[in-house]
Amino acid sequence: MAEQASDYHHGEQDIHQQVSTFHLFVGMTKWGSLYLAALLLLLTIWFCTDAGFIAGLITAVVVSALGFLVLRDKGDSAH
């Protein structure tokens, strides 16, 4: 039993799959939230105000563009 415990060495495991899964999850959450926010904004302006579809579409496109600029990867992250 003592031999099995001695086979483990702290910090020597390969974690590349866990890191890539984490980055995938964060990316899907980030971009999915932006997509849902733009969709909800489009539908809210379209159906709950007198502005109509075009105003809702323009607003959703502007929010999507601004969200893309804010949420994109800057290139300085330590992946």
Image (spheres, rainbow, N blue to C red):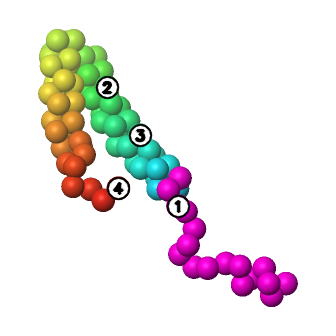
Name the one closer to the observer, 3 or 64. 3
According to the picture, the residue beneath numbered tag 3 turns out to be 28
Name the one closer to the observer, 44 or 70. 70
Residue, far bottom: 2
Q: Which of marks 3 and 2 is in front?
A: 3
Crowding near pointer 3: few (<14 within 10 Å), some, many (20+)?
few
Q: Is mark 2 on a helix, strand or loop?
A: helix
Q: Which is nearer the N-term, disc 2 or disc 4?
A: 2
The residue type indicated by label 4 comes to His
Q: Which is nearer the N-term, disc 3 or disc 1?
A: 1
Q: Is mark 1 on a helix, strand or loop?
A: loop
Question: In percent of the image, x 19 and y 23: which residue is there?
Answer: 61
Work out whether 56 lies above or below 37.
Answer: above
| Residue 11, image x, y percentages | 53, 75
According to the picture, the residue beneath numbered tag 2 turns out to be 39
Question: In percent of the image, x 25 and y 46: which residue is there?
Answer: 73
Question: In percent of the image, x 21 and y 36: which residue is there?
Answer: 68
Crowding near pointer 4: few (<14 within 10 Å), some, many (20+)?
few
Distance Cα–Cα, label 2 vs label 4: 30 Å
Q: With 13 as the anchor, is 74 left or right in this view? A: left
Q: Answer yes or no: do the residues labelled 3 and 2 have beta carbons within 8 Å? A: no
According to the picture, the residue beneath numbered tag 4 turns out to be 79
The residue type indicated by label 1 comes to Ile
Q: What stretch is highlighted in magenta?
A: 1-17
